[in-house]
Image: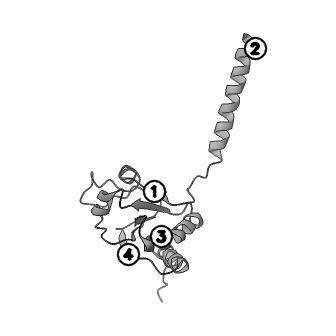
Amino acid sequence: MKRTILILLVLLGGITLSTNAETTNLPKYPKKPIHLTKADFLKKVMDYEKHPKEWVYKGDKPAIIDFYADWCAPCRKAAPALDELAKEYSGKIYIYKINIDKERELASVFGVRNIPAFLIIPMEGRPQMANGAAPTAAANKQRFKQIIDDVLLKKNKTKKQ
């Protein structure tokens, strides 16, 4: 009996250790866009129910929110660029996605009438909306890269002479 209990404890301990080891190997920052629901948005981005008249960003990094729909061809053209940039800028920015067919309230709150629409959220200041997608994945990636570097990370500040 004692031997059986000892074997069970050893096995359970091994499972616990392997589970902890697996979770510590998970990436700290996501390397793909994060899909948001209204509840996620209120928790991670902004609680517009508590602050209906002012922008109070909850994030610890700048972000891009892609308002899209599965049936939208231009949205599908923008998606690969955002997927690549989520990997490239992992740990520096967040890239979120909101399906407007599933989260109509969020689309309404931000006045999204045409898609794709992108909410650009710097750490300081007010967010900005950008609309539309370029005709190619490469052009979309270049467009988003410029927004990330110039607006979100402020890498390309112009020098005053």
Residue 132, image x, y percentages? 40, 76
Q: Which residue is mark 2?
A: 3
Q: Amino acid at mark 4?
A: Asn
Kindly report the distance in space between the C-alpha atoms of the residues bearing marks 3 and 4: 14 Å
Q: Which residue is mark 4?
A: 131
Q: Residue furthest top?
A: 1
Q: Is residue 149 above or below residue 32?
A: below
Sort mark 4 into few (<14), some (14-19) or many (20+) by Cα contacts within 10 Å. some
- Counting residues from the N terminus, which is met first, the one under dot 3 or under dot 1? 1
Asked which secondary structure carries label 3, the reply is helix
Kindly report the distance in space between the C-alpha atoms of the residues bearing marks 2 and 3: 59 Å
Number of numbered markers: 4
Q: Is residue 113 above or below residue 31?
A: below
**Looking at the image, which residue is at 45% across and 56% down?**
35
Residue 4, image x, y percentages? 73, 15
| Quadrant in the picture for residue 66 | bottom left
Q: Which residue is mark 1?
A: 35
Q: Amino acid at mark 2?
A: Arg
Asked which secondary structure carries label 4, the reply is strand
Kindly report the distance in space between the C-alpha atoms of the residues bearing marks 2 and 4: 67 Å
Q: Residue furthest bottom?
A: 161
**Looking at the image, which residue is at 55% across and 60% down?**
32
Asked which secondary structure carries label 2, the reply is helix
Question: Are the two marked residues, 2 and 4, in contact with CB atoms closer than 8 angstroms?
Answer: no
Labels 2, 3: front one:
3
- Counting residues from the N terminus, which is met first, the one under dot 1 or under dot 4? 1
Q: Is residue 107 above or below residue 6?
A: below
Labels 3, 4: front one:
3
Residue 131, image x, y percentages? 38, 75
